[in-house]
Image: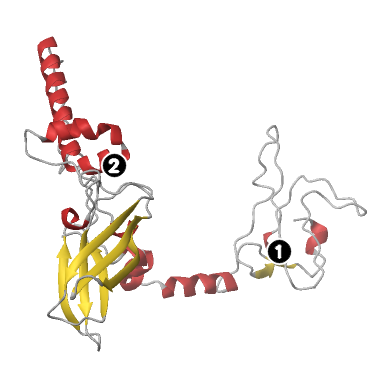
Amino acid sequence: MRDEHVRTHAGLVRCGACRGIFDAREHLVEGTLSPSQPEEHDEFESPHTIVPGIPAVQHAPTVDADEKPRAAAYAQPNPAPNTQTRSTVAMAINASTVTPSNAASVRSDPFLGDIKADDARVEPPGIGHTPFEWKPGAKPLSPWQRVGYGAAALVFSMLLIAQSAYWFRDEIASYLPASAPALTALCRPIHCQVAPPQRPSDLGFVGADLAADPAHKGLLIFTATLRNTGSRAAALPSLVLTLDAVGGEPLARRVFSPAQYAPANANLVRGLDAAGELEIKLYIDASPMAPVGFKVDHAYL
């Protein structure tokens, strides 16, 4: 602090550390500083404040490495006794708010307060884990073992093919008509038959008629055409004929097998070919009854 600073306000200055006001003339130390120029501000001069009475912020001076410390020239005077500043009051308030009783709660983390000591324990590695054990690889198969496994696989494959051919022999013969003789020969030792598959939805009667025979009293003649509308052959079904009375009540019902209604030139084993037709003609003795209507249907029994 220079002499011109002291003379500005009759020697009253404010301490930059404690903010206390004291008479600087009583603590002025004479030094060897050069007098300041009136038109220039010194490097270490305190900045001017815009509002009087409000202290300005002191910036730390830059010290060169070659420059020796001048602590004696810039020694700050001791603050005046019995002077309490705003900083000391704030420090006292902050110190009074933190007491030993609540110091632990202030320092503790609220998110870690509910964690128990056992839960926070670190488990050492290796506990509860089964160590991995290296095992030797499988031994390679010998040539004889490979031959045996190959023969067994071939036998099981042939058995699977034979079983499939047995259960689906009718479908195979329908899709491949040339295989029907071979399948029939294979079925002969085990007493099975090769027949066309049953497809009731592809079959239907067309032009069914029931008329009395003029030459024989009480004799009825039934004629119909069985047609296959499917794309593959179908087994011949059984024919179900029902005679009705005047009120529509059934008087009699009879079931005819393919051997009974099919003509002599029909191939019962082969069935009815795709888009094929079969003419049917039956003679029925209805002398004890007087039917006036009929119903015809087919079914696999």
Q: Quadrant of residue 293?
A: bottom left
Residue extending furthest front?
A: 215
User: Which residue is most to the bottom?
Assistant: 247
x 71%, y 64%: residue? 24
Which residue position is annotated with label 2?
174
Q: Give the tally of numbered discs.
A: 2
Estimate the x, y position of residue 110 in percent, counting from the top left: 36, 67
Q: Which part of the image, by quadrant, shows the C terminus?
A: bottom left
**In the drawing, what numbered circle is on residue 93?**
none
Secondary structure state at the residue bearing disc 2: helix
Name the residue beneath numbered marker 1: 24
116 sits to left or right of 64 = left
Does the rendering let one see residue 160? no
Q: Is residue 28 left or right of residue 96?
A: right
Residue type, label 2: Ser
The location of residue 130, given as percent across then percent down, is 14, 38
**Camera sees residue 222:** yes
Q: Position of residue 112 (x, y in %)?
A: 32, 62
> Nearer the N terminus, badge 2 or badge 1?
1
Observer-nearest of 265 and 34: 265
Position of 158 relative to 129 (above/below) = above
Quadrant where the N terminus sits is bottom right
Q: Are marks 2 and 1 in contact (CB under 8 Å)?
A: no
**Farthest-out residue, right:** 39
Q: CA distance from mark 2 to mark 1?
A: 128 Å
